[in-house]
Image (cartoon, rainbow, N blue to C red):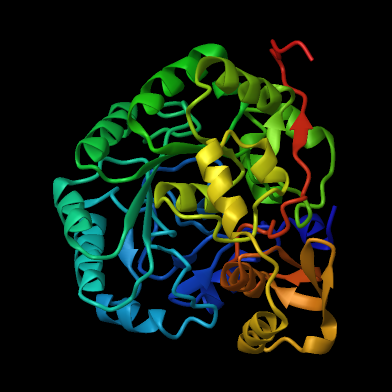
Amino acid sequence: MSARSEQNIPLRGQGIDPNTFVRERQPYTQFQTWIADTRGMVGCPLNCKYCFLQLDGKTPIRPHADTPLEQMISELKNVETYHPNMPVNFGSETDVFSTRHNINYYYDLLRRYGETDFPNTIIFISKCSIPDKILDVATEIKQPVLFYISYSGLGGTKIEPNVRVNDIRDNFVRLKARNLPVIHYWRPFLPQNSNKETFDEILDHVTKYATCSVINGLRLNDGIRANIAKFWPELIEQDYDFSKTGEFWPQGVRGFLAKYLQQKHPDYPAFFGNTPCSVAYAQEKNDIQGLYNGRMCRESQCPETQRGKCAQNYHRPTEKELRRAIDEMGIKPSVTIFDKDMIVIKEKVEAGKLAYLRTALGFPVVSKTITYQAGYNWAKVREDGGIIEVSWKGNWITI
């Protein structure tokens, strides 16, 4: 166990002290796939037990506006890792559509954003009913808007106590009727939702209405593990270095689900652990973050036409392209090398800068050591972080 764990100080993300996060958090924070609004509306009433908001008292509470709308618009251009190809996620510190205050705030923010010249795709992630007025603006503005609907099969249980499944399912129907891209966000997987009945209930619905699915395991740190252990006791039987772990899955479930998808819905796009690919596919674009032919690419159920598009556009950056990108991030050329099919930076680099470089270059970029600026919750910038499978009571899968 880490010294911080021994002192019983919960970490908000993979290596983030919640007090530091609250104190140093900026209006926007660079996450792995997108720039996230981290000081718009803050707080969430949903009380999902695996959510990192649990660890700094931000759920279950009524959300409040932390930054005025005008500042959220003006601050976007000041984000160090801003890139025109980088999506922007509005509402990462709340559920965007969970309260009337949230809805009005993000309605106004989206409308004002649509009046700007920013080209960035907007991302909304929600487990709540999306109001028609949000859909109206999404169809009217010039920038693309993607909706990620989180549908895990845990809604209404003690793990997602305030989530209404009927609202989730209805979102898919309404978004498709509006011809708006809707990505099914399928995570996390726990013993409680790892059964064929739940898989069928979800897949029979989303394959009719969703553009694609993103499938991810559970993200953990010491604090979230303590929350979830009452539902999955085997998680506490072993110590982990959560700064180096990837996704946690009930043993056998990930492999079973991949085969089950191939058997029952072979033509349905499903991306395992691969949010950037869902962004690209939903917009009919090629790979945007240098993931083509990596592990997550190979393990995903991706249409051949999409793979062909990514293959056709995949290229190693020129020295000039690389120099321009690393200069933007203040990285010295002397510590940057090409190593087989990736760029390696031989010094500590902030995770957000690596995400910028991947987007700017469309090519894998890693560093020997990653540092995590306050607020960066999802540590796995390298995609080779292992899938960790943990035993579970009631495992029905023959391995």
Residue 175 at what x, y percent from top left? 25, 40
Asked whether 96 or 234 is in front, the reply is 96
Residue 76 at what x, y percent from top left? 40, 79
Q: Is residue 257 above or below residue 21?
A: above
Quarter of the image for residue 252 reads top right
Who's the residue at 26% across and 62% down the image? 106
Residue 43 at what x, y percent from top left? 39, 57
Who's the residue at 48% across and 81% down the image? 79
Horizontal side, residue 158 vs residue 45: left or right: right
Who's the residue at 31% across and 29% down the image? 169
Query: Is residue 185 in view?
Result: no
Asked whether 188 or 233 is in front, the reply is 188
Quarter of the image for residue 118 reads bottom left
Horizontal side, residue 26 vs residue 94: left or right: right
Residue 75 at what x, y percent from top left? 38, 82
Query: Is residue 323 in view?
Result: yes
User: Quarter holding the C terminus?
Assistant: top right
Q: Is residue 385 above or below residue 186?
A: below
Horizontal side, residue 352 vs residue 242: left or right: left
